[in-house]
Amino acid sequence: MIDKTWGSAVEAVADIPDGASLAVGGFGLSGNPIALIEALLAQGTTDLSIVSNNCGVDDWGLGILLNAKRIRKMTSSYVGENKEFERQFLSGELELELTPQGTLAEKLRAGGSGIAAFYTQTGVGTQVAEGGLPRRYDGQGGIAVASPVKDVRTFEFAGAPREFVLEEAIVTDFALVHALRGDRHGNLVFNKSARNFNPLAAMAGRVCIAQVEELVEPGELDPDSIHLPGIYVHRIVEVGTDIEKRIERRTVSVAQAAAREMPEGA
C-alpha cells in the first residue's frame, strides 16, 4: 500500500530549498495551506517564486512570507489586499507577473495535464498580449523589467475568425494545498469555496504537499466524491479540524448590524 502521510508540516516541507518555485492554493483567505506556509517560514526558506491567486494579507497566508522578505517573485491575478505587497512591488524589491484569473487557472491545469501551452481570447488587445506590463520597478518610478510580447494568432472559432493569445503552462517544483479530507493514498476532498485554486495548484507541482483537516483510511472516501485523485499528491499531513481559519472581510446585513448595536434588554 502506498502511504503518503508525513508526521508534521515541518517534516513535509523540510526539503524545499531556497530559490524553489511553488504553486499555492487559496482564494483570498479561503483554503490557505497555513500550516505548511508557517512551517516554510520557520525553516527560513527564501528567494521563492510563488504562483497563487493572491498573496494573502499582511499578517496571514502568503503575506507572512512576504513580510519576512522570503518571496522573490509572485505570479498572481489579484494583489489588492496587501499593503506590504504594494510597497515591495513599487520599490523594486518584488517581481510580479500579473495574470488574468481564468488564464492563471488554466495555466496551472495545463501544467498538471502535460499541455505545454494553449491559446485563449483573454488578454487580446491589451498589454497582456502586447507586452509592457511592469514586472519589476527600479525603485525610482521606472520599469526595470516589463512583460514580453506574446504570440497572437487568428483561428476560426464559433463561426467567425477571432484572435487568440498564446499562454504557456505553469509547472512548479512544489505545490502547497489545503483540503478538508484526505486518505493515505493522497485522494483529496475540498470544502466548498476552498475548492478554488487548490486542485489546480496541486496538479502543477512536481511534488505536491497537502495539509488536510481529517485523515482517513483508503476506501473511506466515496470515489464519486473525490475532487483530486491521489496521483497528483505526494505528501499528506493531518493538521486537525480546529486549525485557525480567517475571514478576509466579514459582512452582515443592515438588520443584523442594528441588532448587535442595540442595548441589552431594549
Image: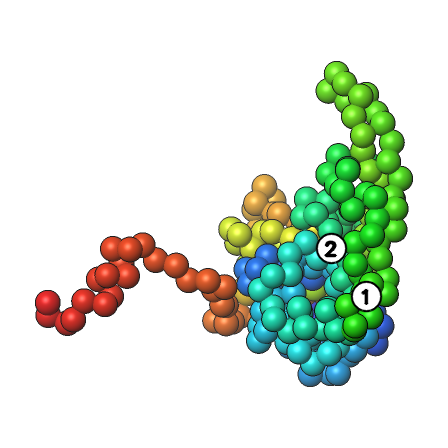
Residue 66 numbered tag:
none
Q: Nearer the viewer, residue 168 or 201?
A: 168
Q: Which comes sooner in the sequence, label 1 or label 2?
A: 2
Residue 151 placement (x, y as % from top left):
89, 39
Q: Nearer the viewer, residue 116 or 218?
A: 116
Q: Residue at x 81, y 66 (%)?
A: 142
Q: Residue at x 49, y 67 (%)?
A: 246
Q: Is residue 166 above or below residue 145?
A: above
Q: Residue at x 27, y 58 (%)?
A: 256
Kind of element beneath mark 1: loop
Q: Is residue 133 above or below residue 247?
A: above
Q: Nearer the viewer, mark 1 or mark 2?
A: 1
Q: Quadrant of the C terminus?
A: bottom left
What amino acid type should be assigned to the residue bearing mark 1?
Answer: Gly
Q: Is residue 16 above or below residue 32?
A: below
Q: Residue at x 42, y 62 (%)?
A: 250
Residue 220 placement (x, y as % from top left):
56, 53
Question: Is residue 176 visible from the viewing direction of this image?
Answer: yes
Residue 241 placement (x, y as % from top left):
49, 68
Q: Which residue is mark 1?
A: 142
Residue 183 placement (x, y as % from top left):
63, 58
Q: Are marks 1 and 2 in contact (CB under 8 Å)?
A: no
Kind of element beneath mark 2: strand
Residue 98 numbered tag:
2
